[in-house]
Amino acid sequence: MSLFSERVRYARELKNLSQKEVAEKVSMSQQGYSNIETGRREPSLSTLRLLRHILEESLDFFIGYNIEDSRGGNLYELYAEARRIRIEAEEDLEYSENMLENPEEDVEKRMKMIRRYKDHLKEAQQKEEKAFNMFYDHIIKVPGYDDYEVDKEYWIKIYDTYQENDNKMNHEFWEEFRSL
C-alpha cells in the first residue's frame, strides 16, 4: 500500500466515513474507491479534488509532502496558543518579582499578586503540556510519520522558529507601514 493510499484511508477514518459514503460522494463504485485505498488504482484529478474537499485535507498531505494533516495542524495551533499564554504568565511573574525590589510599595499586596501569577503560570504550563501531548499523540499516528525521523524536540523547535518568523514579519510590516 502506498503512502497516498494509507493517508486517504486514514483521513476517511478520521472523518468517520465509510468507503461507501466516500464512493457515493465522488460518484464511483465502492469497489473503485476501495481500489484507491488499497493502491490498486490511482484517482483521476477530478476525483482527487473531490477527495481533498470531502476529507478536508490538503493534496500536499495526501502525497506525503506535508507530515501534518488538518487535525494535526489544529492541535499544533492549540499547543502554540497554550505556549504563548505560558510565556506571558512567566513574563508577568518575572515583572511582579522585580517589583519587590522597590520597597515603597505594599509588599503583602505584591506577594498576593505573585502567588496569583504563580498559580496562573502553573495552570498555563499544564495546559501547554496537555495541548502538546494531544498534538504529538495525534501526529505520530499519521501514516508515513516514521519516514520523517522527527521527535518531540523537533516540534518544539518548530514553534520557536514560527514565533521568531512571526515577530520578524510583524516588525518588518510596521517598519514599512511607518515609512508610508
Image: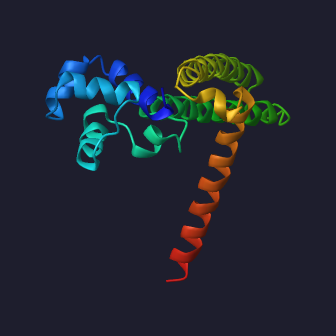
Give x and y (percent) for residue 38. 39, 24
Residue extending furthest front?
40
**What residue is shown at x 55% (from left), y 36% (from top)?**
67
Locate residue 8, reporting x and y percent: 38, 30
**177 displayed left or right of 40:** right
Residue closer to the observer: 104 or 147: 147
Residue at 13% x, 34% y is 27
The quarter holding residue 179 reads bottom right
Give the x, y percent position of residue 2.
49, 31
Apparent side of residue 9 relative to residue 22 in the rendered image (left or right): right
Between 156 and 59, the one lying in front of the other is 59
Residue 56 makes an appearance in the image: yes
Q: Is residue 94 above or below residue 119?
A: below
Residue in the image at 64% along x and 55% along y = 165
Q: Is residue 164 above or below residue 144?
A: below
Q: Position of residue 107 (x, y in %)?
A: 77, 24
User: Can you tell which quarter of the image residue 36 is in?
Assistant: top left
By what rule are the colours in the image chosen?
Answer: rainbow
How many numbered callouts?
0
Q: Is residue 100 left or right of residue 37?
A: right
Camera-nearest residue between 25 and 174? 25
Q: Is residue 105 shown to the viewer in this render?
A: no
- Residue 2 to residue 45: above or below: above
Residue ranking furthest to the bottom: 180
